Image: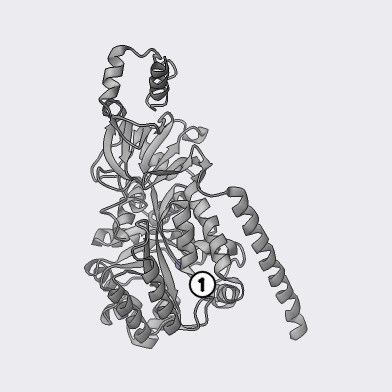
Amino acid sequence: MVLILCLYLQSGLAGDQTADANPIVTIEDQSTQQQLITVDLIVNGDYLVTMEPDSPVITNGAVAIKDGVIIAVGLASEISGQYSSKQVLAGDQRIVMPGLINGHSHAAMTLLRGVAEDLTLMDWLNNFIFPAEVEFVDADFVRIGAELACWEMIRGGTTTFVDMYYFPDETAKVVERCGMRAMIATTVIDQPSPDAKNAADAIQNGLAYIERWKEKNSRITPIFGPHASYTLNAEQLKTVHDAAKKAGVGVTMHMSESPFELEYSQNTYGKTSIEMLDSIGFLDPPVIAAHVVWPTAVEIPILVKRKVGVINNPTSNMKIASGIAPIVDMLDAGVRVGLGTDGAASNNDLDMWEEMRLAALSQKVAKMDPKVLPARTVLNMATLGGAQAIGLDKSIGSLRVGKRADLIQVSTEDVHFVPMYDVISHLIYVADEQDVASVIVDGRILMRDHDMLTIDTERVRSEANALAARIQKALYERQATIPEKQ
Ligand SMILES: [Zn+2]
């Protein structure tokens, strides 16, 4: 009786079942069950979007996972015929797809969202963000801000992010605890920052950070994050490059972001920034370049030749009016292009669904051609293409046997999905972050049916609100003193 009940429960949880599934388990069924290969997790879906090149959407599909690795992808009936697991995510009204890859973020800046709005990039950076960071950012700020960001990213189906911020150990510890995957850069900037006096200090601190994290956790890749070619001179950039090379790690940097950068580079070096960076040998792979809004016709082939991963940040680029990056031209030329949110202070959220939608729409209107950047291409930028751009495509980005099990279930229960003629189209033009139901990274469930399993939501909310209240009070007090001083 116990055995029959167990088998009934197992078949009842096995995802592809319907409400009227036969609960009777016969002796024949038992022998079949016993031959099944035991795995750690089976994830089912009405639709399986693998993002493997040329792979069609599989109807009623499933993924089997063992030891954090995808060991089978196929029809749910085939998977349930070969594998069994105590953990099964049902597939009714679910789309299964690779987790989203946020290629450029400043996670802890969630605590500065909304702090300064409607400003140009240089005004925003120099008069608001940099001073606020020096005043308020410490290890505790980064711990709380990064955890708030990870909560938001998990909720929205992001499984991997590339981050650039101060106190990177704190972000790494948050990622270690919450189960996400991340490349976390230690920021190098030649001005007093929250965690270094100048560029030389930041490089020294950065090397120590990389040493601490290089082999520590397979989900965490420490890298260098030189801020930009206008906040570091050519010699300092070369020093960061050499330090990264020696440490055997990659680099991520803001590149060709605004007309200011172009003008600065032209005036300082007689070359635009990507050309200048190439001329000093900075672009040896692996380099992840955020923004790249203004590459010249000479620079795009350099990005291809050097295998630079470009991260498009449409919301931030539009909000700060940096411009619309020539994504279509770069993709046509063979540049590896992914997508990112940038920090929450210039977005103001970490919603990759919004980035996908805006990437598509902004390119269509920029080219005055609705055919450019179709839905599948944009979905690729957030998954396999994003993985290529950040150099992790051998292990993540698509649902393929042998890859790490980073995947999500998107719920189609919300009425805004009705009717559904085309799954990929709905993922780009309809789905929102609230539609993500379950999130799995490295085979571990981080969110199950909207239930956050690795972050205490109420603790993060109260810690973030308490810190933000202190920041707000200090900002009001500072503003109140300005007229008296004048
Ligand atoms: Zn940025």
Res. 446 in view: yes
As shown in the figure, which amino acid type bears the numbered disc 1? Leu
Q: Determine whether 181 is above or below 254 in the image.
A: above
Of residue 346 and residue 81, the one placed in the foreground of this image is 81
In the rendered image, which residue does mark 1 sit on?
Answer: 121
Under tag 1, what secondary structure? helix
Kindly give the residue lying farthest to the right in the view shown. Answer: 484
Instruction: Estimate the x, y position of residue 315 in percent, counting from the top left.
Output: 48, 59
Quadrant housing residue 288: bottom left
Assign the N terminus to one quadrant of the image.
Answer: top left
Q: Quadrant of the C terminus?
A: bottom right
Image coordinates for residue 311, horizontal then vertical, percent: 37, 62
Left or right: residue 384 versus residue 455 is left
Q: Answer above or below: position of 486 versus 81.
A: below
The one of 116 and 17 positioned closer to us in this rendering: 17
Q: Is residue 290 left or right of residue 435?
A: left
Please tell me in which quadrant of the rendered image residue 386 appears.
bottom left
Q: Residues within 10 Å of mark 1 (few under 14, many from 20)?
A: many
Where in the figure is residue 65, as x and y percent of width and height? 32, 39
